[in-house]
Image (spheres, helix red, strand yellow):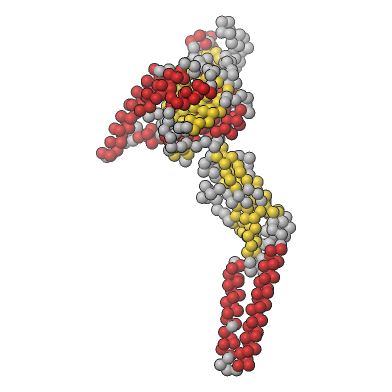
Amino acid sequence: MRPAQRLLVLALVWALLGAAPVAASTLAPALAGALLVAWALTGLVLAVVAVLDLLQARNRAAPRAQRQLPLALSVQVRQPVRIDLISADLPGSVLLADEHPGDDADTGLPTLVRRARASVTTLEYAYRPARRGRAEFGRVRLWLTSPLGLWSLCHYAGEAASVPVYPDFSLISADLEARYTRTRTLGQRLQARSGEGLEFHQLRDYQPGDSPRRIDWKATARRRQLISREYPGEQNQQLITLLDGGRRLALPVAGLTGFDHALNASLLLSWSALTQGDRPGALMFSGETERWIPPVCGRGGIHQMLNGLYDLHPDDHASDFARAARRLRQHCSRHALVVLITRLQPDDSDDLLEALRLLGRRHRVMIGDMRLPAQAALAHAPVADFETALQVAGDAHYEREQRELHTRLRHAGAQVVDATPRQLPARLNAAYLQLKRGGRL
């Protein structure tokens, strides 16, 4: 029974006892007076007991609470949060509520914690942040019942905490791990090749874009398939990702925004560049807002990229590619591979061509065009009614305009990678590695 219910029961019992003097007053006034005195004394005793119970509850030391959080959280990933209640005088049960961020509807607190035999009682629950940024945790609230169970007092314990919420890099780390730990089936040969100026590294399968001069014809004859020589590429080159922070990437896609997928692609490219000995950087542009992450180096550089980008979100501004190109020219004067990640639209032609004209003088440009999954599925949708036919026809017209735009961009010198949000990180990374292997950065 809850403390409020117990107090209500005592009040009802006392009220019922008060009916006895009223009933006795019609029979014997002396008896009624005695019953009235007894009723008043009973009420006084109950009030004294309730006050003493409250004072004892207030004087009892509240448990200490220690919240244990991960150093960082990942967006849309359920991760454990642990709370330790430390007290030698913990009552039989405690109602506990953690002031966690309110973006996870499945986190069901407050909850009832029963005393364990040990002096430390542990509670663990799962929290899944809905968006990147910082997750703000308040203090832990405890409701402790008095010894007689007549009162429930609220206590605050622990300290407020703030934890960064990073992108879910695990979605793309598996592909990255497989790429850099693949089995070496062709072995290594430690001989130099004259005329190349590069130290020979190993043999591998031929890939589109490899120079014919790199084909090893003896190994090709033995295996009856094209085999290329691989040489260590030039290092310390720059890779700059241009992140479109405008409204076109604010649409939700598979539980995340398009900007989240673009950020995942940027981080994968950054990590891949660092493993290749290159220096990645990033520029997020949107209206008057921008954030510039200068090129970093070393394996620890990925933490600088994460800390610089994790709290960015798209806004409601239109994308201005020419302005972004001018800003990048101010930040980066050295030759770099510039990867623009956005969602192209047919009317972007003039703005994009101007941006390519500005960037192409000094940099090599790659454009990652994010296609919405619904558009990709509509191309294969069966036409069962007139409305579906109109949608398919409209999408076909849109796709034709997109292909024409891609053609103009390629003629202007850009490399265009077209993929859905989940495919885009891996495809952009594959395109970068292909340029790296071919010595075309």
Q: Quadrant of the N terminus?
A: bottom right
Q: Is residue 164 visible?
A: yes
Residue at the outermost bottom position: 28
Identify the residue at horizontal 67%, vertical 62% (top origin): 92
Q: Is residue 433 visible?
A: no
Q: Tally the numbered discs.
A: 0
Identify the residue at horizontal 63%, vertical 40% (top origin): 71
Q: Is residue 75 above or below residue 359?
A: below
What is the quadrant of residue 192 in the picture?
top right
Identify the residue at horizontal 73%, vertical 58% (top origin): 88
Q: Is residue 303 above or below residue 35?
A: above
Q: Residue 85 in the image: x percent, y percent?
A: 68, 53
What is the quadrant of residue 55 in the picture?
bottom right
Q: Is residue 390 above or below residue 196?
A: below
Q: Residue 82 in the image: x percent, y percent?
A: 64, 48
Q: Residue 93 in the image: x percent, y percent?
A: 65, 61
Identify the residue at horizontal 57%, vertical 87% (top origin): 22
Residue at the outermost left position: 386
Q: Nearer the viewer, residue 318 or 180?
A: 318
Q: Nearer the viewer, residue 338 or 315?
A: 315
What is the quadrant of residue 323 in the picture?
top left
